[in-house]
Image: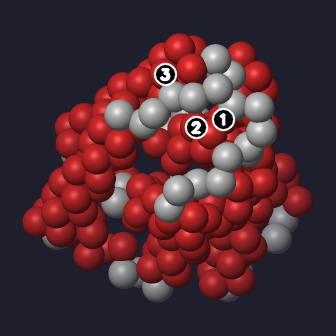
Amino acid sequence: MDAATLTLFVPACFALNMAPGPNNLLSLSNATRYGFRQSCAAGLGRLVAFAGMLVLASAGLAVILHTSELLFYAIKIVGAAYLFYLAVQLWRAPAAAQEAAQSPASGLFGLARQEFLVAAGNPKAILIFTAFLPQFVSPAEASAPQFAVLGILFLLLELLAIAAYAYMGVHLRRWFAQPRRQRIFNRSCAVLLAGAGAGLLAARR
C-alpha cells in the first residue's frame, strides 16, 4: 500500500483502538484482578470477534446490518443486556486484599468469552469497519489485498491497546490493593459498563 496512506491510517486507527470503551474497560478491570498476562490473553477473544467482523465487512455482508433495522436493534439489545449483566457481576464481586494475581474463577476461557461477547454484541463495531477502513482503500488498486493489510494492522494495533490498558490496570492494582479501594474501583467500573450499555441502547444506525 501507499506509504502516505499508511502514515495517515496508523495514528488514526490507534487513536480509535485506544478510545475508552467496554472492551478496554474489561482489559483494565481484568488486569487489576488477575494480572497483566491474563488480561492480555483474555483480549484475544476480542480480536477473534473483530477478525470475524473484518471478514464480514470485506465480503460486503455488513450491508445487511446497514439495511436491516431489526437485525441492528436485536444485536444492540443483546449486547447492552450483556453489558448490564457484567456490570451487576462486577458490582457484586467480593473485594479482598490482593498481594499476588488471582486465578479467574471462570478460567481464562471465560474471560476471553466475555471479551468476545462484548465486542460481538456491539453492532457499531462492524459499522466502523465499513465506514472507517474503506476511506484508506484506493479504488485504483485491488481492494481485497488493501483491506487485508488494513485489517491486519487494525488487529495488531488493537493488541497494543489491550496491552496498554492491561499495563495501566496492573499499576492501578497497587493503588486498589485494599478491599475498600478495590470495591470502589469494581463498582466504578460497573457503573461505566452500565453506562456503556445505556449508550449502546441509545445508539442509532
Name the residue type under label 3: Arg
Name the residue type under label 2: Ser
Mark 3 Cα within 10 Å, few/some/many (few <14, many 20+)? many
Name the residue type under label 1: Thr
Helix or strand or loop: what does disc 3 sit on? Answer: helix
In terms of image quadrants, where is residue 40?
bottom right
Mark 2 Cα within 10 Å, few/some/many (few <14, many 20+)? many
Nearest to viewer (mark 3 / mark 1): 3
Q: Residue 170: image x %, image y %?
A: 76, 34
Query: Residue at image x 53%, y 14%?
Result: 180
Task: Give the residue at mark 1.
Answer: 32
Task: Give the residue at mark 2.
Answer: 29
Helix or strand or loop: what does disc 2 sit on? Answer: helix
In terms of image quadrants, where is residue 149?
bottom right
Earlier in the chain: of badge 3 and badge 1, it is: 1
| 159 versus 27 height, above or below | below
Q: Residue furthest right?
A: 3
Q: Give the Cα distance between marks 3 and 1.
A: 12 Å
Task: Give the residue at mark 3.
Answer: 183
Contact, CB < 8 Å: mark 1 with mark 2? yes
Q: In screen coordinates, is 181 left or right of 167?
A: left
Q: Give the Cα distance between marks 1 and 2.
A: 5 Å
